[in-house]
Image: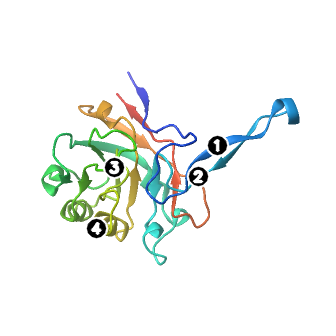
Amino acid sequence: MTRLLDLSAPIETGMPVYPGDPEVSIGPALTVARDGVNVLGLHLGSHAGTHVDAPFHLDDSLPTLDDLPLERFHGPATVVDARGQGAMIGPELFEEVRAGVIVLVATGWPFGRQGHPYLTAEAAELLVERGVRTVGIDAFSVDPTPADAFPAHERLLRAHAVIAENLYGLDRLIGQREIEVSMFPLRITGGDGSPVRAVARVG
């Protein structure tokens, strides 16, 4: 039986954001009582909540969201169980991955908490060499938070890959044989990233 699983964190006022990013604020702009309709006003950064990074996030010369093929945001996925592996997630966990799949790294880390596990530069390099062009993680970043350097971002984004961060509940996918993931960004012209509604189809 096919099931759809939501892999997105709720977007709400005051939610955790990456250090230095715009805070999230959501409130009524129009109301039924006053204006006849309800419309929310949204203030948030392009990397709020569950989101994708375009290569442009790292370098002005790299592709923006609208330069990327839609296939980067949808397709078969494999889940790598990195729970209990320590702070640094090395290349040994990715020996079985292959080109053409979205790689999801399940750390089990609580949403919005710093000090999370992260990919080593060697792990990111291996993924690029294997032809992987979309990598997701259930943490603030594929690099440490906070960070002075971004070696995993560097390896992945300079290969025109897409990074999905702050995915939610990836542990539910561990052990599933057939997984298809969608995490389409908003169509932001010249975008460096975008919140997404990440959904997995399993079964």
Q: What residue type is labelled 1?
A: Ile
Q: Mark 3 points at which residue?
A: 114
Q: Mark 2 points at which residue?
A: 44
Counting labels gives 4
Of mark 1 and mark 4, the one earlier in the sequence is 1
Calculate the distance from the C-alpha at mark 1 to the C-alpha at mark 3: 24 Å
Q: In the image, which is nearer the foreground, mark 2 or mark 3?
A: 3
Calculate the distance from the C-alpha at mark 1 to the C-alpha at mark 2: 8 Å
Q: Decide if residue 71 is in sight here.
A: no
The x, y position of residue 179, in whole percent, is 34, 37
Residues marked 1 and 3 touching at CB (< 8 Å)? no
Badge 4 marks a residue whose secondary structure is: helix
The x, y position of residue 120, in whole percent, is 21, 60
Q: Name the residue under label 1.
A: 26
Residues marked 1 and 2 touching at CB (< 8 Å)? yes
* Residue at 16 percent of width and 55 percent of height: 90
Q: Which amino acid does label 3 sit on?
A: Gln
- In the image shown, does 38 or 198 lie closer to the viewer? 38
Q: Mark 4 points at which residue?
A: 151
User: Quarter of the image containing the C terminus?
Assistant: top left
Of mark 1 and mark 3, the one earlier in the sequence is 1
* Residue at 58 percent of width and 41 percent of height: 13
